[in-house]
Image (tube, rainbow, N blue to C red):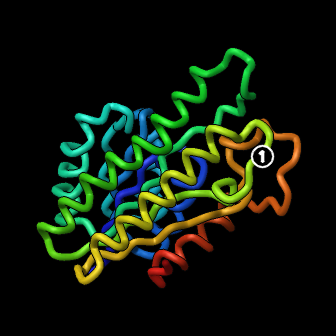
Amino acid sequence: MSKKILITGASSGIGRALAYELAGRGYALALTARRGDALEEIRNDLQNHYPGITVAIHPLDVTDYASVPGVIAACAEGLGGLDILFANAGIGLGEKVGRGRFDKARRTIETNLLGAMACIDAAVALFREQGHGHVVGVCSVTAFLGLPRMASYGASKAGLALYLESLRAEVYGENIRVTVLNPGYIDTPLNDMLKSRPFLISAEKGAALIAGMIEREVT
């Protein structure tokens, strides 16, 4: 039986690339993002490339926190259960501190941290009901080292990493796995405004590496 995964932020970047990677490995997919039209295009393309694959799509803004549990439940219903949540939806606006752009910093925290927490909270409730599940959170190397124009982004990812580590302690002894990913620079629209992206890899290569870590349930 194929694994069933929900990918947030699936319309572009890592989320989109991972959807294609896992479709090729036979996974059933539930894809969410704010742009419903982009999800439609991805679903149609995936089903053309991989006939018979199950692809459920649900528009979701993860900062609409009250709507998250319902969308998670709808995704699980559409797939007949859910094995993995890939909490990936995020933004990086590249703002500088003290330049009158705090609204961008606030949006980054609301999306990358609070939005991810809302999705994880709803998924863990579902996993407890069904008796199993795997939470995979996309953090970042910026959680460990402050970089210019990455202050709010790094703070959001550091917060998410700690949240996930705490979750792992909470579900110890339950059949729920927690994976914390801290990728470096993967070529996506999220970071293409930066002048320097050392050790940059393509989204496709990043997705292949991430898929392997998901399957090994690395911590």
The quadrant holding residue 30 is bottom left
- Residue 53 seen: no
User: Position of 105 compared to 191: left or right?
Assistant: left
Nearer the observer, 156 or 138: 156
The quadrant holding residue 70 is top left
Nearer the observer, 111 or 187: 111
* Residue found 53% across the figure and 77% down from its top: 213
User: Position of 28 compared to 211: left or right?
Assistant: left
User: The N terminus lies in which quarter of the figure?
Assistant: bottom left
Note whether 204 is above or below 152 in the view shown.
below
The mark total stands at 1
Sort mark 1 into few (<14), some (14-19) or many (20+) by Cα contacts within 10 Å: few
The quadrant holding residue 101 is top right
Residue flagged by tag 1: what amino acid is it? Leu
Residue 150, x across and y down, in percent: 71, 41
- Residue 152 seen: yes
Q: Residue furthest top?
A: 100
* Residue found 20% across the figure and 55% down from its top: 78
Note whether 191 is above or below 202 in the view shown.
above
Residue 102, x across and y down, in percent: 61, 22
Residue 113, x across and y down, in percent: 46, 44
Note whether 37 is above or below 119 in the view shown.
above
User: Position of 130 compared to 95: left or right?
Assistant: left
Residue 13, x across and y down, in percent: 60, 49
What element does badge 1 sit on? loop
Q: Which residue corresponds to mark 1?
A: 147
* Residue found 51% across the figure and 51% down from its top: 159
